[in-house]
Amino acid sequence: MEDKLYFTEEERKLLFILYKKLLRLSGDTLYPTDCQTLKRYFTKALTEGNLIRNSFGMNPIIRDMQTAVIVADEIGMRRASILGIMLHELVKQHLYSTEDVQNDFGDDVAGIIRGLVKINELYSKSPTIESENFRNLLLSFAEDMRVILIMIADRVNLMRQIRDTENEEARQQVSNEAAYLYAPLAHKLGLYKLKSELEDLSLKYTEKEMYYHIKEKLNATKTARDKYIAAFIAPIQQKLTDAGLVFHMKGRTKSIHSIYQKMKKQKCPFEGVYDLFAIRIILDSAFEKEKQECWQAYSIVTDMYMPNPKRLRDWLSVPKSNGYESLHTTVMGPEGKWVEVQIRTERMDDVAERGLAAHWRYKGVKSETGLDEWLTSIRETLENAGSDLEVMDQFKLELYEDEVFVFTPKGDLFKLAKGATVLDFAFSIHTKLGCRCIGAKVNGKNVQLRHILNSGDQVEIMTSNNQTPKRDWLNIVTTSKARTKIRQALKEIEARQTEFAKETIERKFKNRKMEYDDAIMMRLIKKMGYKTVTDFYQDIAIEKLDVNNILDRYLDLQKKETEVREEITYRSAENYSIQPQNDEKLFKDDVLVIDQNLKGLEFKLAKCCNPIYGDDVFGFVTINGGIKIHREDCPNAREMKARFGYRIVKARWAGKSQGKQYPITLRIVGHDDIGIVTNITSIINKENGILLRSINIDSNDGLFSGMLTVMVDDTSKLEALIKKLRTVKGVKQVNRG
């Protein structure tokens, strides 16, 4: 027969040993026809097919049987998992289909095989395995938790078998994957024993000298260590027994990998790692007394040995997310040595050694965040299930159902929220890529920006230099990162358009030899119905507004505001106006210090806020290169600083005001009475060093609103004037413009 040629004599002997062991471990869960059908599958595969050995020359049937023994013996899995392991290679190599398996062995076995085949397809995309994302992708992609457990067991088996291989390159790759991918997965699922074995074997193959150096040191110190442990635990045993606790104790030396990590982290030699071992107290407690007796044991230990309060770890009250429960403390033992003591029950120890598989034999397990729903559903299913084995074989992993993991063409992996689109993915890689995205190729097919991604998709983003973000993109993306980046990009585009529009207007002003006044422009913008300056400039940028028409309207408004009205014969204060000549001065004085203690620079005082001596001010470098001085509380200050921070310079007043006067606008609201105007002007005229330049009064529904411009030399005199004006009968408000 073909199988005689396929199996070596040594492999044939091993085959029968493994077969008997598997029957002993799982025979009670197999169906009567399983063994016969399985034999038929392999006989056909060996005679008609071509089962391929891996890069280490391992026989796939032997390897799968060894893995099946591990999952049955060391994790506690049964029929569906074992048959899935034995048959998945035949399906992967297209010797049988999942439909064949489903018909002969049932849906459960076929489901596990589908998961194993899907995981194998992920590897074909050359992922970066050294990432948390890839571990999470495996957990979400496999769907069935048993697939992950099988993968871990298979890697443990592989690491055990490649000790003497000559294929060093393949061994290095397998060892790195064990450390970066499978050991963290085993830790996540609470398989601490298998996790430590993977880490130790990985270190043994990748850093051989360091592994054997630590191993020799451990062997050399074993006798002394055993003697110390015996001396440490003897008095504890006596006290625990006297307290009526049922328990057993054991010393556990740290794994070689764990010691190596400590040496690296603490940058010390082997001798510098003080906590080489831990003492474990395992109590035989009833479930309802577990916590009470663990804390009782803790009290006994810490009464005898001084504890380090910084090293207390309470995983009794709040277990780890993977189900781990234990109480850890570090105490000062004889000879001044620190010793870690772990206190737990038989149930907790079983869970710690065998992982989450052990949970299926217990009820009422508490848990932490992350796996809460998972463990809760296990608990609920247990309470309603007739068979623990049935629960374990049917339980599905839904921990990562709210996330999707997608690949780049190079194999890099990204995690996104479920429902994320191509556009979300583009922005998650880089903002520039997102801004220029026009679509993508998903698994080789062209798709649009709004295409929703699924776990395992391979995505190649397509871009165009002519593409820019659109406002409707905010309705396409689902992630907050993409939405924030799009808003930011739109804001930058608007800022550029606004600046362009503003410069266009200023250029037109120059061409027509017109003087530009911020205050008049602001009033024009408001009069045109715009709530924000940005909206006004945006309409200019998209040519919704004609610039020449705006200049004409500006001239009309300027003319209207500068006309002198002296019609004060009416009882109403409306149209009361005094206007001076427009004489904007160019200042050059040592009274203002600009930027880095520079004096004597030419500057203008901004008309939008009319700063005077004593105000908190800053300088703004205009397009023409001149400097305009604005008050810190200028209505335009925030926008200027946000958009043109590079054009802001520091400024402060120095010395004394020296009698220099500045124009200040005051807004006064009061009852419509010409007498009020007379009283106001009278008060101003009586003030020393204050000159009234202009008044404009508008009247509406019995109220007047007045704009006064006065010349004043500093803030103290201005504040005194404002206080006096507020005392005038009929005046309701006085505010600085």
Image (tube, grey):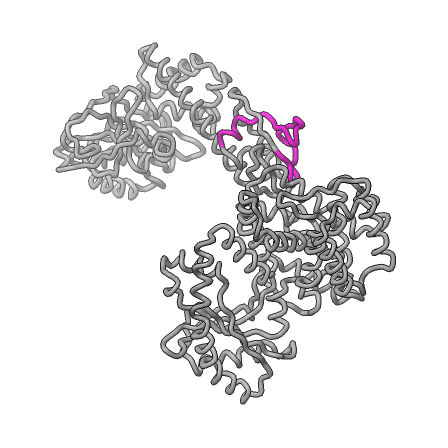
In the rendered view, tell whether residue 326 sits above or below residue 476: below
Dividing the picture into quadrants, the one containing residue 122 is top right
Q: Residue furthest front?
A: 9
> Does residue 294 appear to the left or right of 49 in the view shown?
left
Q: Position of residue 2 (x, y in %)?
A: 80, 44
Q: Residue at x 24, y 38 (%)?
A: 615
Q: Position of residue 136 (x, y in %)?
A: 60, 48
Q: Is residue 706 visible?
A: no
Quarter of the picture holding the C terminus: top left
Q: Residue at x 44, y 77 (%)?
A: 228
Segment colored magenta: 431-458
Seen from the viewer's position, the closer of residues 14 and 235 is: 14
In the rendered view, tell whether residue 289 sits above or below residue 585: below
Q: Position of residue 710 (x, y in %)?
A: 24, 31
Q: Position of residue 484 (x, y in %)?
A: 51, 37
Seen from the viewer's position, the closer of residues 705 and 583 is: 583
Seen from the viewer's position, the closer of residues 664 and 316 is: 316
Q: Is residue 232 visible?
A: yes
Q: Residue at x 52, y 33 (%)?
A: 486
Residue 437 belongs to the span the image colors magenta: yes
Q: Residue furthest bottom?
A: 242
> Does residue 368 appear to the left or right of 534 in the view shown?
right
Residue 37 belongs to the span the image colors magenta: no
In the rendered view, tell whether residue 315 sits above or below residue 706: below
In the rendered view, tell whether residue 130 sits above or below residue 233: above
